[in-house]
Image (spheres, rainbow, N blue to C red):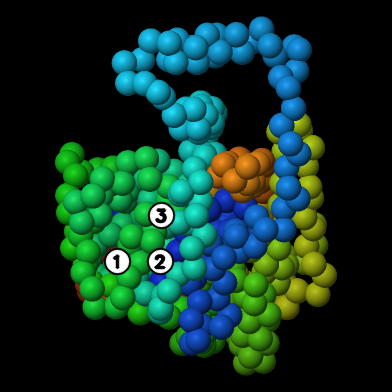
Amino acid sequence: MGKRTLLFIIGAAIVLILVIGSFSIGMFVGGVIPNEETPIATTVLQETIENILETEPPQEATSTPADLEDLFDPFWQGWDLVHDLFIDQPVDDEVLMQGAIRGMMDALGDEHSSYMDPDEYRQANMPLEGEYEGIGAWVDGTGEYLTIVSPMPDSPAEKAGLQPGDQIIAIDGEDMTGIDGSLVIRKVLGPAGTALTLTINREEEPELFDVTLERARIILHAVESEMLDGGIAYVKLNNFSETASEEIIEHLNELLDQDPVGLILDLRNNPGGDRDTAVEVTSQFVSDGVIMYQVYGDGSRDTFQAVKGGLATEIPLVVLINEGSASGSEIVAGAIQDYERGTLVGMTSFGKGSVQNWIPLIDEQGLVRVTIARWLTPNGRTIHAIGVDPDVVVEYTEEDFEAEVDPQLEKAIELLTSP
């Protein structure tokens, strides 16, 4: 059914979240909306706000540097023409200024760099009230439209047939064009049992279509594991929350005590999370060397090395990935593939490998979100907008799901048990 085929995999459901860039992501950067039953989860939105609050206030604006005065002459000419000639006077200078900033960010041509005006900023930072419930999907809110990264197993999103790559064009008939992703998310979140209709744009569909679904309360654990038949250890990593590294060590210890013949690491539909956690998790499977590079616009880079003492650096390994494997998942998969530490099975991953800073502007004029870096695999491969290709391509279709078969997992088992 093509690259955007909906993939369904083993795991627990999770609440709708914002996948934004800054490796506290879903890049991800990513966590679930917390509740009393999921204390290990972290909220991307809350982490973002905390990062903003910790950011040093920007310096007061100064006069335009002399070398830019000539460059900005056409801008000020346009400014004067609007004030002198526009039919509806007076014009709002503050709105014009905000529009100029928005246009500047749009002109970068980077879908993850943008401007949030003061009203959008206030709404995005308003505390979410009540229980955190939604449709159960990881989403990317940094593009033109809120985009499904991956629906969660047994969630309303999965049951309604939402697929990775689906763009939410409207909610209950209200056009979401130009609305910041964090605000769109708020419209999707809501009390369990309430219904909403999403207007979806899907790459292979010629026209927009509506999907109606009912919100639910959904809980996700960061790590799940079990011993499969044939002595194969299976670990499902759902996200890279701050405790995921600690949890995966606990699960690996329990599994390795049973002397498995091989290990399957399932990263399908894992949208990412804390960057450092992703490095720590990778280090459980890669004994030493570079795990990833973070490269900046001036050509400088930060290098992230494996943490010594990994538990599963020798056991035969297969890693499952799909279109919903993003950011932190791609850090892990990319390093394992570069070092030929294990075999990747499934479909090409999502392709999210850039880092954003959220910086508030002076005079409470909103904030700008600027892409400041991209990351590379140990061999210097770019993952952003490309993804990680599996070593063994295996689709998982809706027909497979309905038949309760998992050809990707079956292939992983076959690879670990074949002579």
Q: Which label lies toward us, 2 or 3? A: 3
Say whether disc 2 or disc 3 marks the residue closer to the N-terminus: 2
| Disc 3 target residue | 183
Distance, label 2 to label 3, CA atoms, is 13 Å
Which label's residue is closer to the chain start, 2 or 1?
Answer: 2
**Count of numbered tags:** 3
Q: Is residue 351 visible?
A: no
Give the percent coordinates (x, y) of residue 194: 23, 73
Q: Nearer the viewer, residue 398 or 87?
A: 87
316 displayed left or right of 19: right
Viewer-side residue, 42 vs 335:
42
Relative horizontal placement of residue 202, taking residue 83 as reference (left or right)? left
Q: Secondary structure at mark 2?
A: loop
Residue under pointer 1: 157
Position of the C terminus by quadrant: bottom right
- Report, in whole angstroms, how far the alpha carbon at label 3 lies from the one at label 1: 19 Å
Residue 110 percent across, percent down from the top left: 52, 34
**Picture quarter containing residue 263?**
bottom right
Where's residue 211, x and y in %?
A: 19, 59
Labels 2 and 1 touching (C-beta < 8 A): yes
Q: Nearer the viewer, residue 409 or 231?
A: 409
- Would you say 7 lies left or right of 17 here? left
- Dot 3 alpha-carbon crowd within 10 angstroms: few under 14, some 14 to 19, many 20 or more: some
Farthest residue toward the front?
A: 90
Q: Amino acid at mark 1?
A: Ala
